[in-house]
Amino acid sequence: MVDNKAPSTYLHCHLKMKKIQMEQERLMELERDNRLLVSRIARTMGTKGGLDNWNKYQPKPRDNVISCTFPHCVSSVSADLRNRELVKISLENQAILKKINMTKSVYDHRTWLDDFKVTRGYVNRLLKYPEQPMPPKQHKMLNLV
């Protein structure tokens, strides 16, 4: 006798149960995220979108410290160290500014102006249409001494 039936197929070969399970887990996670988003939107719509992130506490009072005068400033753990560094840096900056103001200039602006006039003459000779001489300006002398 000849067996004409199709070979028996097994269900586990055709159905990928792990794939179905992972798809269900992904859909459950999406549903959970959607529920969370809907609840957030509903809460925002119920409160008309008001802000609730205002800090209502006051900073600790400190003596002999440069501090912020704005009401939203809050003192941190390293505020003293930062203030000391700020004072130190500002003193160094003042000393550097004093040194800069006391030094004489190495460059002479008059020689620069003469060189500029000579260069302008070279350029005018190279141009097809030379520039018209401009009336001399009254330069304000800088007191750099």
Image (cartoon, grey):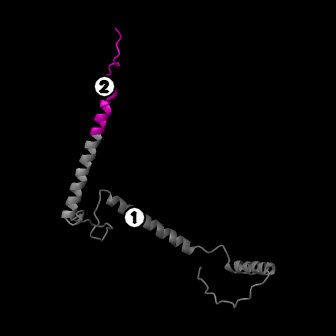
Name the one closer to the observer, 106 or 16. Answer: 16
Amino acid of disc 1: Leu
Which quadrant is the C terminus positioned in? bottom right
Name the one closer to the observer, 53 or 134. Answer: 53
Left or right of residue 44: residue 14:
right
Which quadrant is the N terminus positioned in? top left
Name the one closer to the observer, 35 or 75. Answer: 35
Report the residue at 23% width, 56% height from top: 40
Tell me if residue 18 is in the magenta stretch. Answer: yes
Report x, y in % for residue 58. 22, 65
User: Tag 2, which secondary structure?
Assistant: helix
> How many residues crowd mark 1 within 10 Å: few (<14), some (14–19), many (20+)?
few
Report the residue at 31% width, 68% height from top: 68
Marker disc for residue 73 = none
Left or right of residue 14: residue 132:
right
> How many residues crowd mark 2 within 10 Å: few (<14), some (14–19), many (20+)?
few
- Magenta region: 1-24
- Above-or-below relation of 133 to 48: below
Amino acid of disc 2: His
Mark 2 and mark 1 lie on one chain; the one further toward the N terminus is 2
Tell me if residue 78 is in the magenta stretch. Answer: no
Badge 2 is on which residue?
A: 12
Distance CA(mark 2)–CA(mark 1): 73 Å
Report x, y in % for residue 117. 74, 81
Report the residue at 47% width, 70% height from top: 94
**Quadrant of the rendered structure where residue 104 is?**
bottom right
Marker disc for residue 86 = 1
Report x, y in % for residue 75. 28, 62
